[in-house]
Amino acid sequence: MRFFISLIILLGYRSVHAQALSQELFDTIFASNLPTDTSESGKKKAMLHWPEIKKQLDCYMESPGRYSKGPWEFLHFIDLDRDGLEDVIYVGSCAPYNSTWIFWGEGSGSFSLKNLNDSLRLYFYDTLNSIEQDSSGTQLVLTHHSCCADYTYVISKFVVPKGQKQIVKLASLKFSNRIYSHWEKVGLNKEMKLKSAIISPDSVRSMPSHENYWMEDPASDDMMHYNFEFYIPRRTSGYVLKEHPEKPWVLCMIGETEIGIGWLPKSKITIQH
């Protein structure tokens, strides 16, 4: 039953909200962490429930919240599944990387990882960017920042369906830190609006160039392709973000639920008016 609920949610978003969803994920690149409740009452609530939550975190090497002023900096209290009971989202240290965990409210001020599965432990997502609620449930946007031996940024949108203790991923935007390092050079900013386009088959590049760069990965000593994101095997739809100011290349977003960003020759792009 849960599989069919997840499938219905995904299909509904895929057809109707594809461009809006892509735009939202792109805009999140420039967003900051969603603030927690740092009022005196918010701090007292976090301090009260933190010991119980901390005991349930399956972390190692490093104490959760070690570098913070207090647990109120990484605990969000909200009724995610709309069952009338407040739940908790933990976004913080869970070594070796930061992670996001969901604790379901059980009444009487108690929170538990009951019915825990891997979907409720969102490993590597270190930033909660937004929370929105409507009649269907609660939508969360989370970011995993590139760090250390991991060279990929991931921004994902999830939904907790109303009345369901589960989380469904609607879409993810992925791109390498090489793409991110070129933002300022081409003038990308949060005011950019996506333009629909038809894209021909080609290799999507990390930099606006056909040249192939191979470099040694300092973490593994393996050779890595430094100017390749992914391959488009067939003619497809996508979005144009920005034309390069000096070269005949275009930065594009491709995909509906698994979305990538990269450079393509301008000759491969037909903008839809």
Image (cartoon, rainbow, N blue to C red):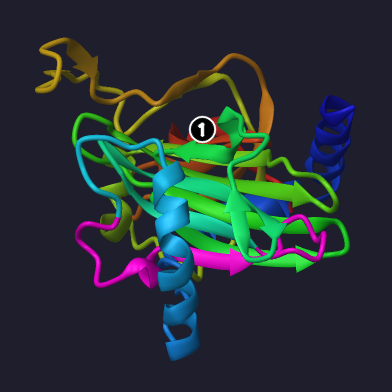
Dot 1: what SS? helix
Instruction: State the residue in front, 96 or 21.
Output: 96
Within 10 Å of disc 1 (Cα), the crowding (few <14, some 14-19, many 20+) is few
Q: Is residue 70 visible?
A: yes
Residue at left offset 39%, top offset 36%: 58
24 relative to 244 in the view: left or right: right
Query: Residue 104, image x and y in percent?
Result: 65, 51
Residue 50 image point, x, y percent: 42, 61
Using the image as rendered, state which of residue 94 and residue 235 is in the foreground.
94
Visible in this render: residue 195? Answer: no
Relative to the observer, which residue lies in front, 21 or 80? 80
Does 99 appear in magenta?
no
Relative height, residue 66 to residue 41 (above, below): above
> In the image, what residue occupies the spot 58% across and 42% down?
113
Q: Quadrant of residue 153?
A: top left
Query: Is 176 positioned to the left or the right of 20 in the image?
Result: left
Along the horizontal axis of the image, is 269 left or right of 19?
left
| Image: magenta residue range | 65-86
Instruction: Write down the residue under mark 1.
Output: 267
**Amino acid identity at mark 1:** Ser
Q: Position of residue 68 (x, y in %)?
A: 24, 66
Of all residues, the one furthest to the bottom in this rendering is 40
State the residue lying farthest toward the front. 108
Does residue 271 sit above or below 216 in this rendering? Answer: below
Secondary structure that dominates the magenta span:
loop
> Residue 109 versus residue 10: which sits nearer the camera?
109
- Residue pictured at 49% horizontal, 87% vertical: 41
Instruction: Please tell me in which quadrant of the rendered image residue 164 appears.
Output: top right
Q: Residue at x 52, y 66 (%)?
A: 76
| Magenta span includes 67 | yes
- Reply above or below: 118 against 75: above
